Amino acid sequence: MLNLVLYLFDISNHGYENITQKFYIVYLGDHPADHEDSAAQTHTNVLSSVTGSYSGATESMVYSYTKSFNAFAAKLSSDEAEKLSRMDQVLSVIPNRYHKLHTTRSWNFIGLPLKAKRDLKSESDIIVGLFDTGITPESQSFKDEGFSPPPAKWKGTCGQFANFSGCNNKIIGARYFKLDGTPDPADILSPVDVDGHGTHTSSTLAGNLVPNANLYGLAKGTARGAVPSARVSMYKVCWASFGCSDMDILAAYEAAIHDGVDVISISIGGGGASYTLDSIAVGSFHAMKNGIITVASAGNDGPSLGSIVNHAPWLVTVAASGIDRQFISKVHLGNGKNFAGIGVSTFNPNKTLYPLVSGADVAQSSESKENARFCAEDSLDPKKVKGKIVFCQFRSWGTDSVIKGNGGVGTIVENDQFLDAAQIFMAPGTMVNSTVGESIDAYIHSARSPSAVIFKSQEAQKRAPYVASFSSRGPNPGSEHILKPDIAAPGIDILASYTPLKSLTGLDGDTQFSEFTLMSGTSMACPHVAGVAAYVKSFHPNWSQAAIRSAIMTTATPMSHRVNTEAEFAYGAGQVNPRKAVNPGLIYDMDEMSYIQFLCHEGYSGSSLAPLVGSKSINCSSLIPGLGYDALNYPTIQLSLKSSKQPTVAVFIRTVTNVGPASSTYNATIRAPKGVEITVKPMSLTFSHALQKRSFQVVVKANPIDSMQMVSGSLGWKSSRYTVRSPIVVYSPGN
Ligand SMILES: *[C@@H]1O[C@H](CO)[C@@H](O)[C@H](O)[C@H]1NC(C)=O
Ligand SMILES: *[C@@H]1O[C@H](CO)[C@@H](O)[C@H](O)[C@H]1NC(C)=O
Ligand SMILES: *[C@@H]1O[C@H](CO)[C@@H](O)[C@H](O)[C@H]1NC(C)=O
Ligand SMILES: *[C@@H]1O[C@H](CO)[C@@H](O)[C@H](O)[C@H]1NC(C)=O
Ligand SMILES: *[C@@H]1O[C@H](CO)[C@@H](O)[C@H](O)[C@H]1NC(C)=O
Ligand SMILES: *[C@@H]1O[C@H](CO)[C@@H](O)[C@H](O)[C@H]1NC(C)=O
């Protein structure tokens, strides 16, 4: 019998303090109950012992997880939750939390060239699962012309739902998860996508080729996913008003594992540093045990250091980079000056010039003057705005809607923070930096009748690649030993499919609709890498989750620390390189036990690992010795310095598996930053057969560096055909 009394946290700081009953997830001992029915029965029995009656239990039960997890979600008072946590069969009781989607604004596309080598038969057997806001079945990206019936391994389902025309041979699964009984008035109880996010991520990952895709003529080209022949299964877990809740995410994991998906793409915020409390970390661990790779977004809270989420070592954590294209709209002033602002404005002006005012000068009253500077709602005098272009400081999104609502013709927003990605405007609009903003403001206050015009947006070149300022940065708050993010992929101004159920901006009064749109966020970077994982898997169906990730990371194109001073904390191994990832030469492989040893080494107790491993008792004191500094065969190396006076020395142990030519030799190439000595033993690895393993040691000796500073180098294993590259990061954690 297990006797594990674990965490019981209060979520009152999440704004639910007035609700006396909350949702909790209750983990029980190891599942594989012989019968799903009897497991569900056990759940109800356990629950009724605290609710006092069977009918009380069935009423408060939301989900009974019986396939991958032995757990249930229920609405409970904190008393009931506490009682449950003291029961023998109960491993842990974790409050349900709500996650956010990882989109900021808008986006573009990399991908494989159209002519890239593909194994179409194998690709059409790949099933990608997305946990998102739903999908648009009518979209051209998901037509099933030329698709055979789903692969035999598929066990998922799809039905007729409200506003959802149903599945086909492309979208082979579509379900929604929301059983808590609180309907979302802004959403539809159906896998249909009323937001656009899920349609966008799905088409980026696996959408068909659609020629002539564009947004009002912008970004014109052939839209397509990384694996256009793969099948899509949508698990709708994110809801317009509520976000994405832990209990729905766990239910989706259970379904996806059972259904037989190969890759899971999850562009949703993670839940804190502890892996055993976070539904994405827990769910993806179970997926990993079943050979399924989960790719997740790093978050949009950059460039602050330590802002990264979804950093569990069994996740692929994706940062967002920019490509060489941006969207600008030119602003012409009455004094003849021209400026380039950032943003997507689809409107052609009707006049050569419009009167121009500053929001601060057209306030409704003297009290509203401070808000008027930001063109906040109800702060402006419509009589003074009508027919004019208004210059506003940035405070929140939607200034364009306020100006239009007041009868204005357009807006110029001054903003130094969000100039990476193009915002789509619902009326003529653009965003300028404060240098330009000051010139415009000076012009408004010096000219007798200031005027301006904003032209329709156009594409412009931009130096690339670089990591988006919004992309969350390391160091990893979950472990000082693992570098995160793992990889960078395009996530700025990505063009992909959109929903007909929402205007481009979603703002009141927006009349722009489009089959395709631009979005930006690590949300958009994530399906690019999930698509590459699916592409790699189509060539190597047997590779483990860790092998696929290793292939993606060790073949990445290095990025420049001159462009992004946070270096690997911004881009991990570098920019994803899909075609190279198929042939990495060597891989750093891992299995379930590797991760468990790592967690023990990190200080997790055997019993705290229950949500990950079930009741299988883990004895962390019987760890295999000799695992080296970080106890994990990770494809990157990170050393966190402990002393500000002495040099720190650490020995990393790694094992590579030969997946290249049977007979090959790799020599080590070391790049060490100043103040760091890196030695590798042995310096050469010789293989004589496929899947042969070789181990080596990397000794890193680093002089002290300032708090929160980092330096980096790399180890590359080079053969005549391959370079297998691992960044080596040395940093000093803040105290
Ligand atoms: C969804 O379907 C219902 C019933 O057919 C219909 O009344 C409603 O307008 C639809 N909603 C949307 C957003 O299409
Ligand atoms: C130009 O005129 C058309 C027709 O009156 C109107 O719909 C459109 O909004 C105008 N465009 C701008 C930028 O004012
Ligand atoms: C502001 O934007 C202008 C026009 O795009 C550009 O020339 C200038 O370098 C920018 N200034 C700063 C400080 O970014
Ligand atoms: C892949 O796995 C299957 C089933 O385990 C096995 O039969 C097959 O030989 C493996 N293929 C390779 C290339 O390892
Ligand atoms: C855990 O492993 C250690 C070392 O192998 C052993 O001494 C100890 O008895 C084990 N504990 C349990 C509960 O099995
Ligand atoms: C590896 O190093 C050995 C000895 O220096 C050299 O003979 C060999 O050509 C090298 N191999 C590669 C692939 O660089």
Image: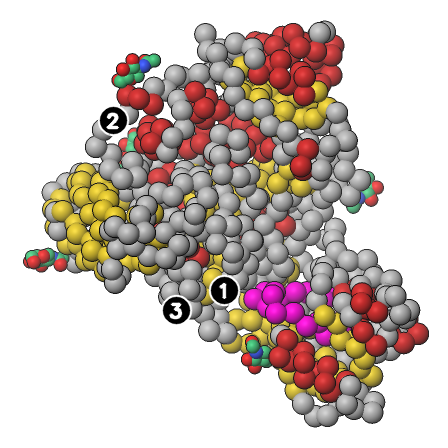
Q: Which residue is drawn at 48% across and 24% down?
A: 611
Residue contact between numbered discs 2 and 3, judged by CB atoms under 8 Å? no
Residue 32 x, y percent position in the rendering? 47, 15
Q: Is residue 116 left or right of residue 453?
A: left
Q: Earlier in the sequence, mark 3 or mark 1?
A: 1
Q: Residue at x 51, y 76 (%)?
A: 461
Q: Name the residue under label 1.
A: 322
The magenta segment: 411-429
Q: Mark 2 points at which residue?
A: 624
The image shows residue 487, relative to residue 68, as above or below, that is below
For the stretch drawn in magenta, the main secondary structure is loop
Q: Does the residue labelled 3 lie within 8 Å of ligand 3?
A: no
The image shows residue 523, relative to residue 63, as above or below, that is below
Q: What residue type is labelled 1?
A: Gly
Q: Is mark 2 on a helix, strand or loop?
A: loop
Q: In this view, does 110 lie to the left or right of 327?
A: left
Residue 215 x, y percent position in the rendering? 65, 65
Q: What separation in Å lies between label 3 and label 1 (alpha carbons)?
A: 15 Å
